[in-house]
Amino acid sequence: MKTITQIGPNSLAKISGIFGVFYGLVIGLLLAFFGRIGGSITGVAVPGLEIASIILSPIIYGAVGYVSGYLGAGIYNKLIVPKFGGIEIEIE
């Protein structure tokens, strides 16, 4: 067993940000789709909702993912590892 005793904050932040962008794209597409359906059912269409949700959701989710990954790595390195030890993994 090997133990992960430190995580690079920038490394985790980049990966979390990339996952956030893809998650935000899915959410943005769903918002656009259901916003279009809701607008056609109710007759109240919001101009630009589809484009705004497809563009803004990945940016916002990516930024939040980056910041949370950076903070999460710092919390892991400074608070979790000294008190509870690192994450044990098995490598072949």
Image (cartoon, helix red, strand yellow):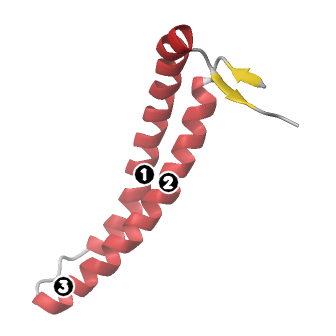
Q: Nearer the viewer, residue 89 or 67?
A: 89
Q: Is residue 30 above or below residue 9?
A: below
Q: Are marks 2 and 1 in contact (CB under 8 Å)?
A: yes
In space, the residues marked 2 and 3 are separated at their CA atoms by 26 Å
Residue sitting at x 46%, y 19%: 75
- Label 1 is placed on what type of residue? Ile
Residue sitting at x 55%, y 34%: 13
**Identity of the residue furthest to the top in this view:** 82
SS type, badge 2: helix
Image location (x, y in percent) of residue 20: 48, 50
Q: Are marks 3 and 1 in contact (CB under 8 Å)?
A: no
- Label 2 is placed on what type of residue? Val
The residue at which mark 1 appears reads as: 59
The disc, 2 or 3, on the residue closer to the chain's N-terminal end is: 2
Residue sitting at x 50%, y 9%: 83
In space, the residues marked 2 and 1 are separated at their CA atoms by 6 Å
When asked about the image quadrant of residue 68, the answer is: top left
The residue at which mark 2 appears reads as: 21
Indicate which disc residue 39 carries: 3
When asked about the image quadrant of residue 92, the answer is: top right
Q: Residues within 10 Å of mark 1 (few under 14, many from 20)?
A: some
